[in-house]
Amino acid sequence: MKGARPKIKLWLESRKGPLVGEGRIELLRAVEREGSLRRAARKLGMSYRYAWGIIKTLEKVLGARIVAATRGGKEKGGMRLTKVGRKILEEFERLKTSINEIVAEETFWEDISMKFSARNQIECVVKEVKVGEVGAVVKLEAKKPGTLTAYITREAAEALGLKPGSKVKAIIKATNVLLGKP
């Protein structure tokens, strides 16, 4: 579509339902930046009670503390994210960046509309992984046609956690062999 650009709305869910989206992440960012839930809520135009309710709901769903308060009144007290709170924030940012990079690729629309057939997917087992500075060479064993070799980026090899014995699918696209976990 000429002039149209894809936009993605990201949120994370737990088994219990929605966990965080951009709004709740913005609250976590503001708490970390401001060092106070009260100041964070004020900057975001929400009541302290509403902001505190969001934090308590997240902690209940996660079963872990996401903020740590320090006592000391107006001048010395405050609030910071715990390791769990920072991890949620970091993971959300990492996923958002990765998804936005994928969506920004010129071939995005072609890739999501591609139909895979039985002819261009082969279930394989990783036999060898040689990770270099930029790329990785992955030797695959397939029942048919035999052994395949794929050259993928180092980041892709690490993100897929490839090691000998890993089960993967080799997806053949034109002149490339792509790897994905089943």
Image (cartoon, grey):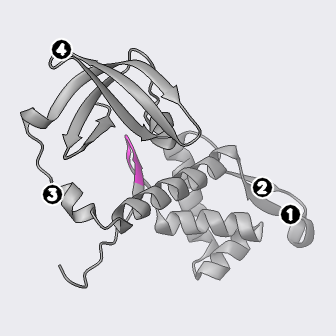
Q: Which mark is residue 149?
A: none
Is residue 122 toward the left or the right of residue 64 in the image?
Answer: left
In the rendered view, tell whether residue 14 sits above or below residue 18. above
- Classify mark 3: residues with Cα within 10 Å, few (<14), some (14-19) or many (20+): few
Identify the mark nearer the N-term, 1 or 3.
1
Q: CA distance from mark 3 to mark 2?
A: 48 Å
In the depicted view, which residue is nearer to us: 94 or 51? 94
Q: x%, y% of residue 107?
A: 27, 63
Looking at the rendering, the stretch of residues picked out in magenta corresponds to: 12-17
Tell me the mark number nearer the camera, choosing from 3 and 2.
3
Identify the mark nearer the N-term, 3 or 4.
3
Identify the mark nearer the N-term, 3 or 2.
2
Q: Quadrant of residue 162?
A: top left
- Classify mark 2: residues with Cα within 10 Å, few (<14), some (14-19) or many (20+): some
Tell me the mark number nearer the camera, choosing from 4 and 2.
4
Residue drawn at point x = 41 percent, y = 39 percent: 152
Residue drawn at point x = 53 percent, y = 45 percent: 60
| Residue contact between numbered discs 2 and 1, judged by CB atoms under 8 Å | yes
The residue type indicated by label 3 comes to Ser
Q: Which mark is residue 69?
A: 2
Question: Badge 4 is on which residue?
Answer: 143
